[in-house]
Structure formats: structure tokens, C-alpha cells
Amino acid sequence: MKRVLAVAALLLASKPALSARPPRDFRVVHVFVALCDNDHQGIVKVSKLLGDGKDPEHNLYWGAGYGVKTFFARSPDWSEVAVGTTPAAPILRRAVFVSKKLATPVYVVADAYDGERIDTALADFLAASAGKKSLQVKVTHNDKTVALDAAAGADLVAWVGHDALMDFAVKKPPEHVPGTVHPDGAIVLACLSQKYFTPVLRAADVEPLVATTNFMAPEAYSLDAAIRSWGAGEPPSKMRVAAGKAYATYQKIADGSGIGLFATGFAK
């Protein structure tokens, strides 16, 4: 039986949402990574090293070869930039990357959450989606300090990891209040995410630009491809194809099979 996630209680500590997004010559993506955790998530077990939700450096979704931190750090399309402050638990690590080749720079703020606290990671993701949680991250890039409005102030939010909604029933998902800033769209890389995340993202009034239709490995190559497509100004239909082709390449399956795993928009 699913547990009920009391999102409202977890929102009490959130900072007030922005009433307007300040003008800027770049775009921001905020990625919420729920670290893989054999002991506290309803997942198919992986090795002890990859599935320790308190060890970001070796975790499947962060420090492993196709984890968000490692993949973006090694990519020729991204540069890692210095982060000014250390996040508080249950965020165990924060990394920020900036695009190298896009006409309008894109910053990716990636937060790795303690796998045992996947409920808080989900609550933060939903609060950001609905415009109810603000966050500013200061980074140093080209010898300048840049203040990035993330969470509700991000242009795009993303979830990477286990589909927590298979384990938790969200009793009352946060709803977007008209007139407050919130992201323009979401990417949800988790098993069957279009089905499970549609109700909560409808409440937040944030459309899933890329989601999934079946079980899958939520690894960073699909996230990277979808973000770069979005950053180039392509529509969700092309973001879906980009994510699917990347998945097919790394999983060594046919392009059609990879693309078919991804969807755009709310489930009908």
C-alpha cells in the first residue's frame, strides 16, 4: 500500500515564490536528483556501491559514469562552474554547469538528495514546479559572480531517479497561484513518469515536455540531450526524439524503441 506524502507540511520551510522573474540573458534548469537507494526506495536492487543513497560520489544517478554529475562534468557541451555555498541536508551535493555551444547560455543547477529522503526531494520538486519554493544559487563564471534563480525561478525543472509516486500518494499536490513565477516546463526521467506525474504537474500547471511511458534507466544522457534540444529552442516533439535517440545509443537498442519510451504532454 502506498504511503501518503504530506507535501503541504514539507512546504512550510520553503521561501516565498517570486512574483516576477528578473530579466536575464541566460536560462536556468534545476535538476532534482533523488539518489538511488536500495534500502529506502521501491526499486530493483542494484549493487551496494551504486545503491547507497548517502554516497553521492558512487551513486548510480550522480557519481557513476552515467550519473548527472559525472556525465555533465565529462561532456564537451558543458563546463562546471564554482558554487558559492554548500546546500543543507538532505541535499548532499550541488553541482552547476553552463552550456558551451548554445546561443543563449543555459545553466544547469543539479541537486543530489539523500536517497532516504526521496519524499523531501519530491516535495521540493513539486513546490518548485508550482511556484511555491524560491532558491538563489550564486556561482562564479568567467571571474564574475552570477546569481541564478532556481526552483520556482528556473525556466525548466527536471526530476531524475526513482518514480517516487509509485511509493507515495500525494494527498494534496501544490497548486500554482496565477501571477506567481514558476517554470515553463518539466522533464521527468523516471519509470512510467507520464502516467504518475500527470496529476501533480497538472496541479502545478507545468507541462511535462519530456516524460516516459514505460520502465527505464533514468541516466544523464537522455537529460543532457533533452536540455540541449530545449536550449536550442526546439519544441517538445524534438526534445522527445533527442532524449529517445540518446537512450537508444547508450542502451544499444533501435532508435524507434528509444524514442517510443518517451512522450511529451500530459497523459490522457
Image: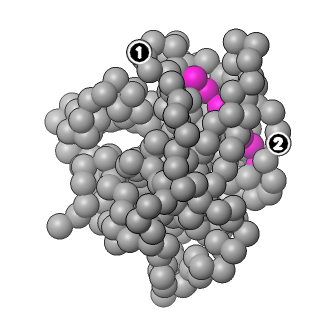
Q: What residue type is labelled 1?
A: Ala
- In the displayed orientation, state which residue is furthest to the bottom: 1
Q: Tell me the crowding category of disc 1: few under 14, some 14 to 19, or many 20 or more residues within 10 angstroms, Cα based.
A: few
Quadrant of the rendering where the C terminus is positioned: bottom left
Say if 80 sits above or below 181 in the image. Answer: above
Task: Using the image, tell me which numbered label, if any, was put on residue 86.
Answer: 2
Task: Using the image, tell me which numbered label, if any, was put on residue 62.
Answer: none
The answer to which of 27 and 227 lies nearer the viewer is 27
Apparent side of residue 169 relative to residue 38 in the rendered image (left or right): left
Say if 147 sits above or below 136 in the image. Answer: above
- Labels 1 and 2: the sequence-earlier one: 2
Q: Which amino acid does label 2 sit on?
A: Thr
Q: Tell me the crowding category of disc 2: few under 14, some 14 to 19, or many 20 or more residues within 10 angstroms, Cα based.
A: few
Residue 139 rendering spot, x and y as whole percentages: 73, 29
**Which of the two discs, 1 and 2, sits closer to the camera?**
1
Q: Are marks 1 and 2 in contact (CB under 8 Å)?
A: no
Q: What stretch is highlighted in magenta?
A: 92-98
Secondary structure mostly seen in magenta is strand
Q: Name the residue under label 1.
A: 103
Residue at horizontal 42%, vertical 17%?
A: 102
Residue at horizontal 49%, vertical 73%?
A: 174
* Magenta region includes residue 94: yes
The answer to which of 82 and 69 lies nearer the viewer is 82
Say if 248 sits above or below 206 in the image. Answer: above
Residue 5 rendering spot, x and y as whole percentages: 56, 79
